[in-house]
Structure formats: C-alpha cells, structure tokens
Amino acid sequence: MKQTILTITGSDGTGGSGVQADIRFIHELGGSAVSVITSITIQNTLGIQKIYDLPCSVVRMQLEAIINDLQPQVIKIGLLRRTDVVEILTDMLHRYKPRHTIYAPVLQSAKGEQLVSANVYGEIERLLIPLCTVVLEPSDLPIGPRRHGHANQLASALAYYLSLGEEVSDAMLHAQTYLKQLPADYADGKTRSEELYNQFLAELERYYDRYADVAFYAEQLNVSSRYLGQVTRRITGRSPKSIIDERITGEIITLLSTTSMPLKEVASKLGFSSQAHLSRYFKKHKGLTPTEYQKQIRYSNLKK
C-alpha cells in the first residue's frame, strides 16, 4: 500500500521545480503528496529575483501539523537555506524516524545562482545527511539532456516508488527508467521571451517615430517595464531603452544621409518637440549634433 509523501522544500511560482513540481509529479505517478515550504522564491522563467526564507517557527508549525496528522513515512527534502531549519529537521527525523528520507541537494538555481551558503551546507552535511536513506548525486541522473527540475523529478519519482514499499535499489531503477520515458520538453521552463521580444520589435517599428519611453512599449505588450527589461537583457544583453534609442538614432541618420529634409521637419517627423530637442538627443547618443553629422557626410562625399 502506498504511503503519503512529504516534500520539504522551497516554492517555485513557475511550477518548474520546488514544491509545486513535487506535488504535480507525485500525483501524476499516482502518489499522494503533502508539503512543508521552507522558502518562497520570487521568480519567473527568466530567473530568481528574490528569496524569502520562512522563519524557523513557521517551518516547525508546518512540520508539526503535517506529521502529527498524516504521519508520512517517506520524506523528500530539497531547498534548505537556514541553519535553524536544518536543526529542527534533524530533531524531527531523530524523534519521528520515518521509513525513508531522501535529500535532493538544491544548491544552485537553473540559471546558476548560488542558493545555499557554505555555512548552511556544512550543517546539512554534519546533521542531516547522516539521517537520510538516500542522498542524490549528479551521477544518479539518467544519461541524456538535462532539463529544468530534472534532479527534482528524480527525487520525486524515487519517493513515489519508495512509498510503494520497494527497496531503495529497485525504487531508484524504476525512477530513472520513468524519467527516461518523459518527453524532452517536460517541465523545461519554456518561456515566451523570444515571442515577447519579437513583439517588442514589431511595436517599436510601429511607434518609434512617436514614442521613445520603455513604459509605453511595456504597456502595449501588457507587461511591466522591469519584465521587458529582463527579456531584452536575456536575449540581447541590452536594455529596452538602448534598443529604442538605436532605432530612433538610426532613422535620424537615414533621413540626414538620404534626404534634404530640414532638421525641423526631421524633428517633427520623429516626434521631437523641437529641432533643439532633436539635436540634444542625437548628440547624446552619437557624440555630435545633426548639423555636425551632415558636415561629416558632405566632407566624406567630397573626398570620394
């Protein structure tokens, strides 16, 4: 008879890892999962912006509520970022003695951010690991391409098969086999970043002659300016403002180089309040005024 599985880890709002992924994955296998949250991550598919670690007292209350009532015999432990939380978990394992405890180290995010300090991990090694039935190693993962939450999925699958009463070696084999059968894009954290970036470029092409502020384009795309900035930096390494400015200055150069349009008309055509405004903007981004740029063009043409 399968047992309830308790997952103790952080919350991942994207669902690609953390407690959300654990519960979904275990339920997909046919198991029953309950949870205790240690940290709340503020993140999206572009990465983690901030982490709030729950106070030890809150983690303890969650543990007591679940264990006293449901008495799970299989426990999976993931993200731990506080030494006092490591200590209460150690105390709980000593007192409660579940049949199986799996520790799946969560030390870095999928984007490479360090999540656990050396001091905390030192306490994990000293206090927690000796009490675990299984400590997952990178070598436990099936050979093949890695995806977001891959180690997390292995630990969840292992917990499920252990909850059926299997021996550790058999449960590990079944878990690894199950992971191999998953589609390559399972929970891979696919984002709409490229789609949004292309939409941004399309909106820029539509409005560059009227709007130069990031907030306008973010509003058109129904996202925050901050998120738009995350997307453009991830894809190009540049801010949305620099991309906007490049498009506008490029158009100014085109008009100065290929037409005889007076600067006043260029300014009006591109949404500047005055010729002086245009000149200040152009000099800020190109290092010289439109008039100076036109002189350079004429001089260059005479030399040909």
Image (spheres, rainbow, N blue to C red):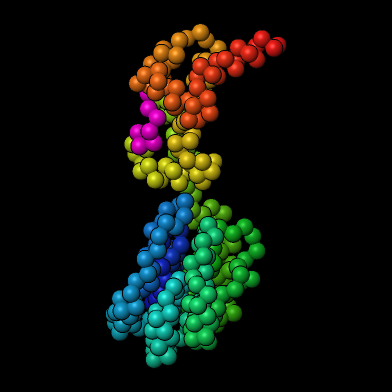
Task: Please tell me in which quadrant of the rendered image residue 72 appears.
Answer: bottom left
Task: Please tell me in which quadrant of the rendered image residue 19 appears.
Answer: bottom left
The outermost residue toward the bottom is 95
Q: In the drawing, does residue 83 fall left or right of residue 114?
A: left
The outermost residue toward the right is 304
Q: Position of residue 277 (x, y in %)?
A: 39, 23
Residue found 38% across the figure and 58% down from its top: 42
Q: Please name whichever residue, 285 or 213, is drawn nearer the observer in this view of the structure.
A: 285
Q: Is residue 244 above or below residue 4?
A: above
Q: Position of residue 226 (x, y in %)?
A: 39, 45
- Residue 225 visible in the displayed image: yes
Q: Which residues are magenta?
A: 210-217
Q: In the drawing, does residue 257 fall left or right of residue 240?
A: right
Q: Quadrant of the N terminus?
A: bottom left
Q: Please name whichever residue, 209 or 104, is drawn nearer the observer in this view of the structure.
A: 209
Q: Is residue 127 above or below residue 206?
A: below
